[in-house]
């Protein structure tokens, strides 16, 4: 085991996969000379050169499209979008093209592209630099959507994403890059489509992912001091959802709270709760709940942003009301 | 190497195959046997044949929803194309893609696209892959002149120049963006100066001359293969039928269409073949051969099975 930051873990994953497979190359804004605005691609240009580490112009639709074309022709591009908010600039290429080309071709082509982007607020970056789109993207048939919360999961999932052979949206969080965690040495991958029970508990199941997963763990510690033991499940993959792990947990705890940073309205929480009611209708002793951002654009000033985005205290309060 | 005169009969037959494919599809459509939309390329066959024949089977190509001609000229099986139009399991996309998404990677056809300009960066990406793999394959992309007002067209032209991609950009200018004359919605009537402004060689040609189209694309391919980067070809042509089935064509006169018919590529190639000494009987023979190809394709498609409903749930992921 070695202690790495989330950014370092991603850097390791990229380096290992680029060493192992000459088809893997990376593209994005400021990823080469600068090493990435969050240092994820630090020093990859030195090792792999400008052919495989390409600084792009500010042309999200163009370079995502190029990535798709390169993938169709046998390469394995890993394309970085500086902010998930910019996915909208490339939305046609992601949703109408990458997700659908294989199906529309009757399976005769594939699009092995990974699109990495960081989501989220909490830093006062403003409404156009703080969004979370995992729910919209998860709704698109043909996209795999993952969102690791820890350095170990980040490294393992990125390696799996690069090897997946299909379009993967790899979601990071701007406030996770400097978090530290233990990462196994040697060849380490995490399977796509498998959630992880990050904390065992018997009183309530809290499902979360990405940075909010850390809030859920923080809330679980506070709740423990009040005699409530929460089981915290880290989704890790948003689409496909690992309902088996969730339902098994809920059958044990009989209470479910889903919390995510993206807007509560039409979010992944709503989807998970709907499926729990479909697949295990008698499991819950109290109605399931979901927490997410309030339905306003994300503001800048700290008291405003904190009022909009779910905080650990909100999770504690929600659980208390369900006990 | 230009398109030699002894290959012109083949080109004539190929253009007629495309034309009769479109005519047959129109009939099927009017009989209610095809669903969805159909965007015919009648009148534009020389762009497809001249362009696709000037590159190799292993070279990549993307085209638009008006792409039946490009796809067939690049080598897509006419049987598979017809079966796809009829929504059969033997269609090139097993009935899942339809008219606007013909794909066949075995002949370099990376896909026809229903989103204007969206396939341009795909061809550029394939060109990038070829460059990175140190192969000499090039990529050819066809788009209409309406695409030159889409953002991703501009983004791709810039990327193609800065990375010197082995890409051939063919703007098939048929003077109408859907149902609106292009000159009303585009700041310059000629599109090739836009490409030249990005720093690549750009020309405008009379693309209803299949030999000229072939020679121009071949020159661009040679430039791309030798590391000379992208070329832009504005291929002037004319769309003899409407934008799609059901287009009442209120935006142009019948006289204009009749005038354009005098300049259409199949008629011009017939004239050229006669100049080269072929007889009316030869031309009729080649036309009959084209008809036989289409009749065979239609028979194949009609006798093919429909896809099973459970097939709707496969081919999403590799």
Image: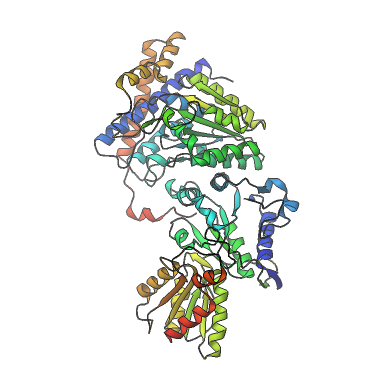
Q: Quadrant of the N terminus of chain A?
A: bottom right
Q: Nearer the viewer, residue B58 or A234?
A: A234
Give the farthest residue toward the right: A46
Q: Residue furthest bottom?
A: A227
Answer above or below: position of A58 versus B1.
below
Q: Split into 4 quadrants, where in the image is the C terminus of chain A?
A: bottom left
Residue B221 visible in image: yes
Q: Nearer the viewer, residue B86 or B43?
A: B43
- Vertical placement of residue B16 versus B76, above or below: above
Identify the colour scheme used: rainbow
Q: Residue shown at 49%/33% (left/top)?
A: B142
Q: Position of residue B23 (x, y in %)?
A: 32, 29
In which quarter of the view is residue A66 placed? top right
Specify whether A283 is left or right of B231.
Answer: left
Residue sitting at 46 percent across and 85 percent down?
A320
Left or right, A284 with respect to A222, comes to: left
Image coordinates for residue B104, horizontal then vertical, percent: 47, 40
Question: Is there any visible trace of residue B230 in the rendered image?
Answer: no
Residue occupying the point 69% across, 64% down: A8
Residue B165 screen position, x and y as percent: 62, 37
The number of callouts visible is 0
Q: State the image coordinates of residue B246 (x, y, percent, origin top left).
A: 28, 34
Q: Quadrant of residue B1?
A: top right
Question: Would you place residue B151 above or below residue A234 in this image?
Answer: above
């Amino acid at each position: 085991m070695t202690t790495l930051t989330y950014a370092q873990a991603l850097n390791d994953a990229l380096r290992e996969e680029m060493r192992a497979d000459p088809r893997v190359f990376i593209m994005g804004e400021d990823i080469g000379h600068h090493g990435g605005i969050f240092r994820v691609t630090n020093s990859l240009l030195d090792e792999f050169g400008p052919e495989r580490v390409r600084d792009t112009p500010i042309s999200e639709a163009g370079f995502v499209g190029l990535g798709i074309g390169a993938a169709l022709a046998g390469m394995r591009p890993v394309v970085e979008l500086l902010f998930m908010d910019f996915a909208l600039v490339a939305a046609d290429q992601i949703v109408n093209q990458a997700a659908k080309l294989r199906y529309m071709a009757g399976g005769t082509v594939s699009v092995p592209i990974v699109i990495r982007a960081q989501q989220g607020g909490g830093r006062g970056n403003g409404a156009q630099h703080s969004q979370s789109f995992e729910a919209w993207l998860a709704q698109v048939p043909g996209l795999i959507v993952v969102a690791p919360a820890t350095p170990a999961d980040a490294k393992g999932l990125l390696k799996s994403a690069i090897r997946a052979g299909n379009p993967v949206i790899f979601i990071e969080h701007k406030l996770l890059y400097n978090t530290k965690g233990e990462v196994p040495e040697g060849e380490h991958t995490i399977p796509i489509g498998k959630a992880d029970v990050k904390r065992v508990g018997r009183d309530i199941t809290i499902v979360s992912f990405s940075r909010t997963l850390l809030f859920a763990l923080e809330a679980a510690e506070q709740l423990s001091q009040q005699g409530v033991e929460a089981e915290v499940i880290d989704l890790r993959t948003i689409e496909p959802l690992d309902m088996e792990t969730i339902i098994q947990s809920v059958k044990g705890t009989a209470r479910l709270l889903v919390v995510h940073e993206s807007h509560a309205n039409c979010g992944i929480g709503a989807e998970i709760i709907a499926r729990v009611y479909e697949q295990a209708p008698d499991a819950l002793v109290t109605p399931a709940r979901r927490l997410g951002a309030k339905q306003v654009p994300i503001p800048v000033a700290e008291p405003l942003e904190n009022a909009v985005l779910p905080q650990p205290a909100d999770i504690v309060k929600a659980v208390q009301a369900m006990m | 190497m230009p398109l030699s005169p002894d290959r012109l009969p083949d080109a004539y037959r190929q253009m007629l195959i495309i034309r009769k494919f479109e005519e047959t599809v129109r009939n099927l459509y009017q009989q209610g046997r095809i669903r969805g939309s159909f965007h015919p390329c009648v009148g534009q066959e020389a762009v497809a044949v001249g362009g696709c024949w000037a590159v190799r089977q292993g070279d990549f190509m993307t085209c638009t929803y008006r792409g039946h001609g490009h796809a067939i000229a690049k080598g897509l099986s006419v049987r598979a194309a017809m079966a796809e139009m009829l929504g059969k399991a033997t269609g090139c996309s097993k009935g899942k893609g339809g008219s606007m998404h013909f794909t066949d990677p075995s002949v370099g056809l990376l896909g026809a696209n229903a989103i204007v300009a969206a396939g341009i960066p795909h061809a550029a990406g394939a060109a990038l892959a070829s460059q990175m793999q140190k192969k000499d394959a090039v990529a050819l992309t066809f788009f209409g002149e309406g695409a030159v007002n889409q953002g991703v067209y501009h983004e791709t032209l810039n990327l193609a120049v800065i990375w010197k991609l082995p890409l051939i950009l063919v703007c098939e200018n048929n003077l109408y963006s859907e149902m609106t004359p292009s000159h009303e919605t585009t700041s310059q009537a000629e599109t090739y100066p836009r490409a030249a402004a990005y720093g690549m060689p750009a020309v405008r040609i009379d693309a209803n001359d299949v030999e000229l189209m072939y020679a121009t694309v071949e020159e661009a391919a040679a430039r791309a293969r030798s590391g000379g980067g992208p070329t832009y070809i504005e291929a002037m042509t004319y769309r003899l039928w409407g934008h799609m089935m059901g287009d009442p064509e209120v935006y142009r006169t019948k006289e204009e269409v009749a005038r354009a018919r005098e300049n259409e590529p199949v008629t011009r190639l017939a004239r050229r073949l006669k100049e080269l000494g072929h007889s009316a009987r030869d031309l009729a023979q080649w036309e009959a051969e084209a008809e036989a190809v289409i009749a065979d394709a239609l028979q194949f498609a009609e006798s093919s099975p429909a896809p099973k409903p459970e097939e709707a749930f496969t081919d999403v992921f590799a």
